[in-house]
């Protein structure tokens, strides 16, 4: 099981992180809440990333068996989730919301608005793809159009991403869920929940 460290590559958000082991079954495989990141102070610097002490599971193209859900309260209710790097939660991922609500380490009572942060598309081996750019370029070199999240694990086989991006992580946690572009939460106080299918 993964552990949250509170690490942020761009330390301009006030956040806390926790780990839980809640499982909710949407069908063939249960969802597992691995991290909950609560953000209480907006900033133009972005969210940064989350170091991990265990690898995520992905396919040959570097796509992870995880989703990132933004859970927040909006006075008008559910929003359109149309900001850069965000999308409505598809029906196939709705069970991730149930898993987030069942997490014993957070209070889901205020939540009435759920959006999904987009996992960047493309191949880690294609230097023009958004996924490759997220995995390998410094923040200041990324095009504004690259908005969403990617997974960086230089120790994977094959390696995913540039090792310099995770060098600030603890030595045994040099892998990262990285948030790039402007996938900023829609509310001032919000939670980002990383929910994964177990191996």
Image (tube, rainbow, N blue to C red):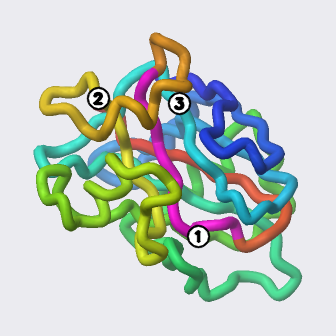
Locate the C terminus by quadrant. Answer: top left
Kindly state the secondary structure of the residue where label 2 is placed.
loop
Percent of width and height locating residue 15: 78, 42
Kindly state the secondary structure of the residue where label 3 is placed.
strand
Q: Please give the label number shown on residue 54.
A: none
Q: Farthest residue in the front direction? A: 141
Q: Are marks 2 and 3 in contact (CB under 8 Å)?
A: no
Percent of width and height locating residue 104: 73, 35
Determine crowd level at label 1: few under 14, some 14-19, many 20+ residues with C-alpha closer than 10 A. some
First in sequence: mark 2 vs mark 3: 3
Above/below status of 187 relative to 108? below
Q: Which residue: 47% across, 69% down?
A: 147
Tell us which disc is closer to us: 2 or 3.
2
Q: Residue 197 falls in which quadrant of the image?
A: top left
- Residue at the spot of label 3: 51
Q: Please give the label number shown on residue 154.
A: 2
Q: CA distance from mark 1 to mark 2?
A: 24 Å
Q: Nearer the viewer, residue 60 or 109?
A: 60
Query: Magenta segment, which residues?
Result: 174-185
Q: CA distance from mark 3 to mark 1?
A: 20 Å
Q: Nearer the viewer, residue 81 or 49?
A: 49
Q: Which residue: 72% across, 73% down?
A: 186
- Residue at the spot of label 1: 182
Percent of width and height locating residue 36: 66, 41
């Amino acid at each position: 099981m993964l552990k949250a460290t509170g690490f942020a590559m761009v330390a301009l958000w006030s956040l806390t992180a926790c780990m839980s082991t809640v499982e909710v079954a949407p069908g063939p495989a249960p969802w597992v809440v691995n991290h909950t990141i609560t953000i209480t102070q907006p900033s133009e610097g972005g969210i940064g990333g989350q170091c991990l002490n265990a690898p995520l599971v992905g396919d040959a193209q570097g796509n992870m068996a995880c989703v990132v859900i933004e859970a927040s309260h909006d006075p008008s209710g559910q929003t359109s989730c149309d900001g850069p790097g965000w999308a409505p939660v598809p029906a196939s991922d709705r069970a991730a919301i149930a898993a987030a609500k069942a997490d014993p380490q957070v209070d889901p009572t205020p939540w009435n608005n759920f959006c999904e942060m987009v996992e960047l598309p493309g191949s880690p081996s294609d230097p023009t793809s958004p996924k490759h750019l997220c995995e390998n370029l410094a923040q200041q070199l990324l095009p504004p159009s690259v908005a969403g999240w990617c997974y960086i694990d230089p120790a994977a086989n094959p390696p995913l991403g540039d090792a310099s991006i995770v060098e600030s992580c603890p030595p045994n946690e040099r892998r990262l869920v990285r948030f790039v572009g402007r996938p900023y939460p829609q509310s001032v106080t919000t939670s980002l929940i990383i929910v994964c299918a177990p191996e």
